[in-house]
């Protein structure tokens, strides 16, 4: 049996995903988590064979959890689960150290196949994710979008701000100072040619960087 950690902030979604995985009769969900810190704690305590991590969670998001898991539990491969199939998310997930990327719209069979493949030490990307990654390789940095100009931390801070988090809340989530968050905010506004948080939120929504 492949032992899996399942992290998603919606209990109904976790219930559905657990059923899909365990109905395969080859996978056992040994731990669940509703936020980033809990996901990290469960992974360190239970040492699952694969961690299935939602990209959008309270506190630490899935990208941050993936980055930390690669440092603290390098033997636990991560499969990112998300609503997004946009290129920037695929790239960020791979950069964070994820071994796979599956959207919630994917067929249940894809989720099971992804867990099995990652457990074997191979990568798994949906067709759209593969196309997005290939497009990035072909383009290189020649036509970098505004969003792609952001560092991973800047993207994370952008998403938090767009979802209404305060600078102090963001600082707590990522264990950084409020001053550092304000610095990131200033960089983001400059890179995206925006003036305030209202424009920042509108940009995030228009570019599908946050879930409505």
Image (tube, rainbow, N blue to C red):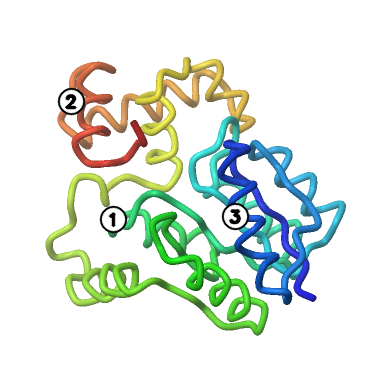
Of the numbered discs in the image, which one, if any, rests on residue 168?
A: none
* Residue with the most extreme left position: 143
Q: Are marks 3 and 1 in contact (CB under 8 Å)?
A: no
| Above or below for 7 versus 5 | above
Tell me the CA gap for discs 3 and 1: 22 Å
Nearer the camera: disc 1 or disc 2: 1
Residue that badge 1 annotates = 86
Residue drawn at the location 48% of the way across and 72% of the way down:
110
x, y percent for residue 158: 36, 32
Q: Nearer the viewer, mark 3 or mark 1?
A: 3
Residue 84's place in the image compared with 11, above or below, is: below
- Between 30 and 199, the one nearer to me in the picture: 30
> Residue 125 location in percent, x, y?
42, 73
Mark 2 → mark 3, Cα distance in angstroms: 38 Å
Residue where numbered disc 2 is placed: 194
Q: Secondary structure at mark 2?
A: loop
**Element type at mark 1:** loop
Q: Residue at x 56, y 63 (%)?
A: 79
Left or right of 187 in this view: 78: right
The residue at which mark 3 appears reads as 17
Mark nearer the N terminus (2 vs 3) = 3
At 27% from the left and 41% from the top, the residue drawn is 208
Task: Say which label, 1 or 2, has the lower sequence index.
Answer: 1
Above or below, 142 against 191 in this view is below
Name the element at disc 3: helix
Q: Quadrant of residue 203?
A: top left
- Can you tell which quarter of the image residue 128 is in? bottom left
Label pair 1/2, CB-CB below 8 angstroms: no
What's the CA distance linking mark 1 and mark 2?
Answer: 22 Å
């Amino acid at each position: 049996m492949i032992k899996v950690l399942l992290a998603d902030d919606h209990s109904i979604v976790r219930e559905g995903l657990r059923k899909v995985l365990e109905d395969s009769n080859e996978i056992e969900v040994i731990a669940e988590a509703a936020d980033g810190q809990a996901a990290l704690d469960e992974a360190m305590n239970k040492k699952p064979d694969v961690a299935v991590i939602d990209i959008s969670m309270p506190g630490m998001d899935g990208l941050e959890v993936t980055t930390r898991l690669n440092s603290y539990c390098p033997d636990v491969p991560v499969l990112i689960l998300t609503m997004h199939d946009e290129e920037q998310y695929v790239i960020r997930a791979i950069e964070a150290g994820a071994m796979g990327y599956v959207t919630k719209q994917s067929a249940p069979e894809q989720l099971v196949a992804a867990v099995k493949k990652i457990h074997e030490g191979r990568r798994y990307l949906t067709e759209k994710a593969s196309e997005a990654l290939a497009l990035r390789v072909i383009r290189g940095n020649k036509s970098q979008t505004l969003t792609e100009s952001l560092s991973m931390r800047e993207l994370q801070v952008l998403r938090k701000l767009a979802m209404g988090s305060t600078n102090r809340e963001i600082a707590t989530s990522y264990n950084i100072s409020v001053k550092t968050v304000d610095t990131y905010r200033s960089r983001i506004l400059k890179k995206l040619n925006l003036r305030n948080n209202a424009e920042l939120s509108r940009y995030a929504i228009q570019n599908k960087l946050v879930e409505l």
